[in-house]
Amino acid sequence: MNDAREAMLNRLRDAAPSQARQTVPLPPFARAADGDATLIDRFAAALERIGVTWEVTDTAVSARLYLVTSLQANAITRVLTWDAAQLPAPGLLDTMNVLGIETISPDLRAAPPRMRPQDPDSRGDLLRSVATIEVGIVAAEAGFADTGALAVRGGKQRPLLAAYIPRRVVVLLPASNIFPALSHWLANEAADTGEVVTFLTGPSQSLDLELISAAGIHGPRQVHVVIIGGI
Amino acid sequence: MPSPFKTRAAQALDDSDLRTSLTRASSRLQRWRNQAFDDLETPWADLQAAAAASRQAALDHLPELLQTLETRLLQRGAEVVWAEDGAAAFRYIAALATARGAERVLRGRSPLAEEIGLDAALAAAGVNVINTHFGDYIIRLAEDRSTHPHFPALHQRAADVADLFESKLDMPRTLDPQAMGGMARFRLRRELPRSEMMICQAALAAADSGTLALVSDSGEDRLAASVAQIQVILLGIEQVAATLEEVLFLTQMGSRSASGHGFPGAVTLLNGPVQPDNPDGPGELHLVIVDNGRSALLATPFRDVLACIGCGACHNVCPVNREIGGGAYGDHYRGPVGAVLGPLVGAMPSISRRGAQTAPSPVAAADIPLLDPAYADLPLASTLCGACADVCPVGIDLPEMLRSLREQRLAAKGEGPVDKALRAAFRWATQDPANYRRTHGWLRRELTGSVAPPLRAWQAGRDLPKPAAKLFRDRWAERTKP
Ligand code: SF4
C-alpha cells in the first residue's frame, strides 16, 4: 500500500495550488431568539428542544440526595456508572451502595476479545451481564447553551458504555461547565489527551421510518441532566 | 432503447405511492432545514461562505493535511492504509478480518462503503456483514438499496416495513416506528458481543489533532467504537479539515442542513486505539484512506464537488429527486450531487493511472471520458433551477457542473436530428419578437393539454404549472401605459 500512498499523494500535490494555508474564521451559530436570557436558562431551553429533561440543584450534596431519592422511587437496583472519583457528586456511589443499589463500572478492555470460537467469551459475558441495566450515570465535561449538546470524555474509570447501554442516562454537569457554544469550550480545551470524547445530543433517535422518531435504538431513550450549583 | 436511468425514472414516476411519500418527506426535511438556519442570528450567507472557505482550504492542502493526520494517528498506535480504489480497500479489510478470525463484522452508515460495494465483496469472501444503522438494516432486510445519503430508507413506507418485520423477523405486525425500532435494537444489541470488528466511515477528520469524527443520528458508531475490538474507519481523501474546530463547525452545518438538528444526535471524536492509561475506544484502529478516482477529479474543473459533506440537503430540494427518488439514479450515486459524481468518479481511474506515471497537468472538462450510459444520463436529471446550490452548506455550484457535463455528453454523443431540430426551432423562436410571441402562444395552448409528439415523451414525467392567463409582457405593457 506504500506505492498507493505515494501515487495518491503525488496526484494530490500536482493538483493542489502552492499558496500557504490561511486560517478560516468561523461565525457562531447563536440563536436569534436567545436575547438576554441567562446561560442556564438558554441551556435548559436547548435541552427541552432536544427532548432532554433536567433538574437544577444548588450543591453536590443536594444533587446526591435528589439522585438517590429518584432511583429509589423508580425501584432501580443496579446502575452502570463511572468510578466515584470521576463524578462531581462526592459520596454518591457510597450512598447508593448503602441503600442497596449496586453500582457497576464496566472495564471492557480488561476482558480479552474472543477472536476464535475456542476463545473464552469474557467480553460477551460482560456485555450480556450489563445489557439489562436500566440506568447509567456519567458526568459531562461541558454543556452547550445553543444546542443542548453535552461533551462527555471517556477514559480511565470513565467507561462510555455507561452512557450508551442503559435506556436511561443521567448526566451530571457542574453549572460552571456550561458554555454559550461549542467554540467557547474548544477555545478553553485542555491539551490534546487522545481520549475519546462523545457528544450526547438527547436520546438516541432514528428518523428512518417516514421521518417519525424511534428512540433508543443505539443509545438511551431518555437523557436527564442534573445541573449542579446552578441556583 | 431508453438508458437504465430513464427506465428507472419512468418506473419511479409510475409509482404514485412512492412519489407521495418522497414529496412529503422531502418537504418536511426542507422545512426543518430552513427553520434551523432561520433561527440563527448569523445570516445563512455568512455561514455558507465560511463553510465553503473551510472546504476549499482543505481541498487546496490535502497532501499536508492527510500526512499530518496520518502522523498523529500513527503516533497513537493506529494503522493507516492508503487505498487507490475500492478493490484495494476491500482487500485490506478482508485480509484483516481473515487474520483476526472475524467472521461477522458490524457496518455503520457509510456512503463510501456503498460506493465501493464493500458489503457484497465481503459477503462473497465469506464475511457476514451486519448493518447497524436502522435505515440500512431495513434496506438489507428488504434486499433493497439505499436512496438517500442521510436516510437510506426514506422511500420505504412504514406499512411495508411492518410487513417486512412480520415476515422476516416474526414480529407481530405494527405500524409503530418505536416498536419496530425496539425490535431492531433487540436484534442489533444481540450482535454486539458476537462481532469483534466494526466498519464505519468518518464524517470528517481533523488533521491538527489527528481526530476522526464519527457522526450519526442514533449513535451506532459510538457504541461500536466502545465495544468492538477492531475498528476500521473509511475516509475519502477529501474528508479532512485543518482543525477540530472546522470539523465541528462543518458537522453542525451538515446536521442543520440534513435534518434541521442544531447538533447531530451522536458525535464521537476518536484519536486512536486504546492506550494503557486510556482504556476507552477500540482495541485496534485501522484508518483506510480511499481515493477511488478522487485525486484525479481534483485536477479537473469539477474539483469543487469534492467539498461535499454529504448532508443530503440538495436531494431534498431538487424537484427531480423529489419525484423519482434516489433509487432511480443508480446504485451508488444519487440526487444532484450524485448526478455530477456518478459520471465522473467511474471515469477517473483511467485518468488516475495516467497521472501516476507522468506528471499530470490539470485536466480540461472536455478530456474527461464519461462513464457508461447508465451514469452519463444522470446530468439530465435536473431542471437547472439552482435550488441545490442555494441550500448547499458548502456552496457547491452543482447546476453549473451539471450544465457542463451535459455539454460534454452532447459533444461525446454528437448532435442528433432531434437536437438539431430543437436548436433550430429555438433560434427561430428567439431571434425575432414576433416569432417569440407566436411560439409563446403556441406553447401556452399546447402545454395545457396533451402535447404533440415529439414533446409528448418529454412531458410525460413532468407536472407543468398552468400558464398564466395573461403574458407577462402584456401585463407589463398595460402597467407602463402612460
Ligand atoms: S452537494 Fe452540498 S447540499 Fe448536496 S449533499 Fe453535498 S454538501 Fe449537501
Image (cartoon, helix red, strand yellow):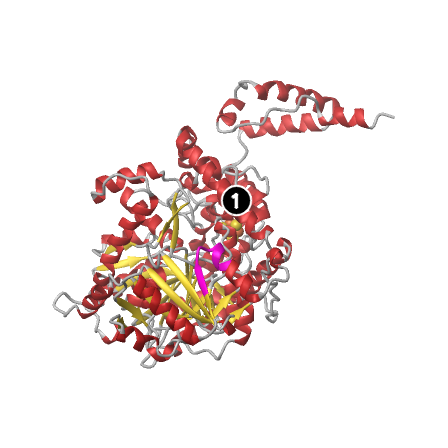
* Residue B336 appears in view: no
Whether residue B248 appears in magenta in the rendering, the answer is no
| As drawn, B16 above or below B317 | above
From the top left corner, tell me how far across and down residue A171 is, in percent: 40, 67
Tell which of B157 and A146 is nearer to you: A146
From the top left corner, tell me how far across and down residue B83 is, in percent: 37, 63
| As drawn, A172 above or below B362 | below
Q: Which quarter of the figure is the N terminus of chain B placed in?
A: top left
Classify residue B223 as left or right of residue B255. Answer: left
* Residue B410 appears in view: yes
Q: Mark 1 points at which residue?
A: B30
Q: Which chain carries label 1?
A: B
Looking at the rendered structure, the kind of residue marked 1 is Gln
Classify residue A98 as left or right of residue B67. Answer: left
Tell which of B234 and B3 is nearer to you: B234
Residue lying furthest right: B482
Residue B467 is drawn in which quadrant? top right
Q: Give the range drawn in magenta.
A: A46-55
Tell which of B221 and B437 is nearer to you: B221
Residue A162 is drawn in which quadrant? bottom left
- Which residue is rendered at x = 59% and y = 70% of the image? A21
- Which residue is rendered at x = 43% and y = 75% of the image? A60
